């Protein structure tokens, strides 16, 4: 009886992999991004690392498309601030919040298929 290597292949979760792209690119909008849960950031990264490169780029492009819809003046102001990133699964949406503690907040949600949208603040 031979080994079935296909059953041992690593799998990634598209929602979590896209969540890492959101965390990485959303956090880069700020002067500094502090992560409230490093273990969860690593968990997201592991899914992202397993995602094929073309799909990584597609996820990053989707994040950029959402970020480009933000007010440029607001984005410019956020570049001067520190934020704290928080991961908040809510139902079937994986939410990532970037909070500046009173100066602004950005929330992005990822659905199970990896689609990204801005959340109402």
Image (cartoon, helix red, strand yellow):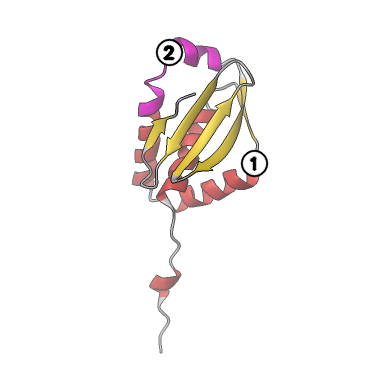
Q: Nearer the viewer, residue 88 or 116?
A: 88
Q: Position of residue 34 (x, y in %)?
A: 64, 31
Q: Does residue 83 show up magenta in the picture?
A: no
36 horizontally vs 68: left or right: right
106 horizontally vs 14: left or right: right
* Residue occupying image coordinates x 43% and y 13%: 72
* Residue occupying image coordinates x 38% and y 47%: 53
SS assignment for the magenta stretch, majority: helix
Q: Earlier in the sequence, mark 1 or mark 2?
A: 1
Q: Which residue is mark 1?
A: 37
Residue 54 sits above or below residue 67 on the image: below
Query: Which residues lie in the magenta part?
Result: 65-78
Residue 39 sits above or below residue 85 on the image: below
* Residue occupying image coordinates x 44% and y 29%: 119
Q: Nearer the viewer, residue 31 or 39?
A: 39
Q: Position of residue 70 (x, y in %)?
A: 41, 18
Residue 88 sits above or below residue 103 on the image: below
- In the displayed image of the protein, which residue is found farthest to the front? 91
Q: Position of residue 113 (x, y in %)?
A: 36, 46
104 horizontally vs 5: left or right: right
At label 2, counting other C-alpha atoms closer than 10 Å, the crowd grade (few under 14, some 14-19, many 20 or more) is few
Q: Which residue is mark 2?
A: 72
């Amino acid at each position: 009886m031979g080994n079935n290597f296909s059953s041992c292949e690593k799998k990634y979760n598209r929602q979590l992999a896209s969540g890492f792209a959101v965390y990485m690119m959303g956090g880069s909008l700020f002067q500094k991004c502090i992560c409230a849960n490093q273990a969860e950031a690593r968990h997201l990264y592991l899914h992202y690392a397993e995602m094929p490169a073309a799909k990584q780029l597609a996820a990053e492009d989707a994040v950029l498309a959402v970020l480009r819809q933000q007010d440029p003046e607001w984005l410019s102001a956020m570049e001067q601030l520190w934020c704290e990133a928080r991961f908040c699964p809510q139902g079937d949406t994986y939410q990532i919040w970037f909070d500046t503690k009173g100066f602004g907040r950005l929330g992005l949600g990822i659905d199970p298929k990896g689609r990204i949208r801005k959340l109402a603040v």
